[in-house]
Image: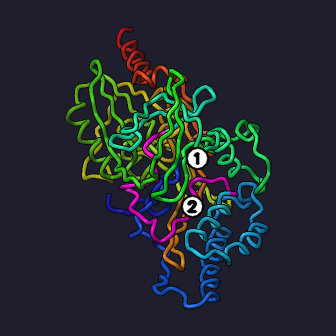
Amino acid sequence: MHRPSTFRQLVTALFTTAALLLSPVTPIARAQNTRARVTQAPSSSRELSNARLAVFDDVWRTINERYYDRDFNGADWEALGPASRSLAAGPRTQAELYEVLRRMIGQLRDPHTRVYAPDERTDWHRPRSLSVGVRVREIDGGLIVAAVERGSEAERAGVRAADAVVSIDGEAASTVLARRLAMHQERRQVGRQLDQSVALAASPSARVAAVARLFDGPRDSFAAVTFEDRDARRRTVRLRRVLRERAPSLGVRHVDGFGVVELTAFTPEVAAGFARVLRGRLQNVRGIVLDLRDNGGGEADAMVDVASFFLPAGRDLGRFINRDGRTHLDARTRAAMLSAADAITPFRGPLIILTGPRTASAAEVFAAAMKEQARASIIGETTCGCVLGVRRRHTLPDGGVLEVSEADYRTARGVRLEGSGITPNEAVTPTLQDLSSGYDRALQRAVEMLKAMFKN
């Protein structure tokens, strides 16, 4: 195909994560709206204040003009402007200014609209995030360690999957979670008493975001975290908040004659690799389990490339709609890849997709299309519900970057996924025992279903 991709013109990428990520939707080199960077520090407090306000005004105005929802997702954007602007003039450091900006943007309750300070810019193909070495999720009302990063301080300290997070810096973990959730609630005021009703009322996407930000704090600072193991033994460890880089990956293995493919993002490299493994290692498999549980999205073109291996060319994958209600584009499968110079040979065997709360953005578009067209069964948990589109990145006067959700998504049947996500055909949730023993209940159920298909 020689014409430019419509996807790449409108939504060069769909990427979200519930955590505090320093991973842009598109590489900074692709920013289409550039401004001259401030190369010299202001020489006086007045100049400093004016420089801060210039950044603030640019952020507020850009969101006001471009945001996909004229009602700003229920936030009073007009009132937020003056109230937040007075705070933006006072910060002594750039970090404080960007905290003011993030608090204002947080009122939109939209994980795709976000701002990055100049030193936080990065190539989203290798996203970076602040981490203390553990990934936490909610199970049975508790905050439970789902995974421990290899080589991390947490691993060296003996923290294990299935341990419960009891407190952070001396504060009950449930209270910290309630405060994180409060940031997603409309018209909540600083100083208002926090209670468990906040947690109960939060949307699934807000809960994912809040849990992922449980250990938020300045880079290279320490969090004193108390864990409790399954024998009720407690330990408190100091974990450094470090910036970790994670490259999107494609993992392939065979289980009982079926192919299990884990995609952690949709990128051109991952899509091209997927095409290669279909022609090679997966050439003779009877069915495929596609694991998207840790897939936060990626480039829309790459997602369409992968989808095109499972659906005939020309199938409707949904559409993106702007603030005026106009359809900017219809996403459709194709006969040749954009990510590689390859024709697409469809895989016609059965497909099962694994999803979870961290399945987001382009991964949700993919799963929704496969489910609506009865091409795949979905097993696991409801997805994030984070499916807004960012058209382009906006460079701020100080060199920071703003990303604004400019398009909403509807499936081919007109279903909106933002805030609700995709409900699996069969719900499978990991238990504490599963985490402790390393048993993958959802994967085992998927393999059982594939086996049953070939027995009948």
Q: Is residue 1 visible?
A: yes
* Quadrant where the C terminus is found in the figure: top left
* Quadrant where the N terminus is found in the figure: bottom left
23 w.r.t. 142: above or below: below
Q: Is residue 353 magenta?
A: no
Report helix, strand or loop for mark 2. Answer: strand
Which residue range is magenta in the image? 107-135
Q: Residue at x 48, y 50 (%)?
A: 331
- Residue 386 screen position, x and y as percent: 57, 47
Q: Nearer the viewer, residue 145 or 58?
A: 145
Q: Is residue 6 visible?
A: no
Disc 1 marks a residue whose amino acid type is Asp
- Residue 321 screen position, x and y as percent: 61, 55
- Residue 401 screen position, x and y as percent: 51, 69
Disc 2 marks a residue whose amino acid type is Arg
Q: Mark 2 or mark 1, which is nearer the start of the sequence?
A: 2
Q: Is residue 130 magenta?
A: yes
Q: Residue at x 50, y 81 (%)?
A: 35
Q: Which residue is mark 1?
A: 169
250 w.r.t. 126: above or below: above
- Residue 120 screen position, x and y as percent: 46, 65
What label sits on residue 318 in the rendered view?
none
Q: Which residue is mark 2?
A: 114
Which residue, as the protein is rendered here, is positioned at the far bottom? Answer: 43
Q: Residue at x 35, y 13 (%)?
A: 454
Q: Residues within 10 Å of mark 1 (few under 14, many from 20)?
A: some
Tell whether 291 sits left or right of 222.
left
Report helix, strand or loop for mark 1. Answer: loop
